[in-house]
Every structure is written in structure tokens, then in C-alpha cells.
Image (cartoon, rainbow, N blue to C red):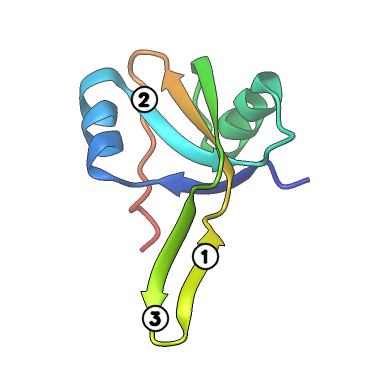
Amino acid sequence: MEILVKPLVTEKMTDQSERFNRYGFVVDKRASKPEIKKAVETLYNVSVESVNTMVYGGKVKSRYTKGGIITGKTAAYKKAIVTLVEGDSIDFYSNI
């Protein structure tokens, strides 16, 4: 099971990383906090202080077209906010 799906690079998460040393990841729905902590520590060689998780359910969206109303649903996902110990940091742009 691939625990870390992708990092969250948004304006809010960038501000959180600069101010509070927190980083966001989209993770597998079945992953637990200790598994997420271990995956981040091994992948980025940092020490994790705490892990907070939240599950987002998909939103129902609809649009009006010439053929009628089309309804669908956005994808559901689990998000993890990882707080690192003082002095550690993750650079997502290092290998671009």
C-alpha cells in the first residue's frame, strides 16, 4: 500500500509550512497516523512531532447542459497534516 499519494502545495499549506513547520499530504484512506509518520520520516529523512488527519467526502456537483442536468461527484480523499520538530524542513521543489 502506497501511504503518501502526493504532497499538498497550496497557498494555505505554504503559509503553514513557513509559520508552523507543518506540511500537508494526500494519503491512502486506510493509512493510520503511525504509518503516515513512519512513511514521512523514511522518505524525507526528518523527525515528525505530530500527525493530524482528516477525511474529505466527495461533493455532489451538477451542471446544466444542452442535453439536460449532469450530476457527478468529486473524489473523496484523506489528508494528513504533519508537524515536524524544530529545525527540520521538507523541500518539495528540490528535484524539479
| Residue annotated with mark 3 | 65
- Nearer to us in this view, 62 or 30: 62
- Nearer to us in this view, 8 or 89: 8
| Residue annotated with mark 2 | 22
Query: Image quadrant of residue 83?
Result: top left
- Nearer to us in this view, 85 or 19: 19
Secondary structure under tag 1 reads strand
Secondary structure under tag 3 reads strand
Q: CA distance from mark 2 to mark 3?
A: 42 Å
Residue 40, compared with residue 77, is above or below; it is: above
Residue 53, compared with residue 72, is above or below; it is: above
Residue type for callout 3: Thr
Give the residue drawn at x 46%, y 72%.
69
Q: Earlier in the sequence, mark 1 or mark 3?
A: 3
Q: CA distance from mark 1 to mark 2?
A: 36 Å
| Residue annotated with mark 1 | 71
Give the residue drawn at x 39%, y 69%.
63
Q: Earlier in the sequence, mark 1 or mark 2?
A: 2
Query: Image quadrant of residue 12?
Result: top left
- Would you say 74 lies left or right of 2 here? left
Q: Quadrant of the C terminus?
A: bottom left
Residue type for callout 1: Thr
Between label 2 and label 3, give the one nearer the viewer: 3
Q: Earlier in the sequence, mark 2 or mark 3?
A: 2
Q: CA distance from mark 1 to mark 3?
A: 11 Å
Q: Quadrant of the N terminus?
A: top right
Residue type for callout 2: Arg
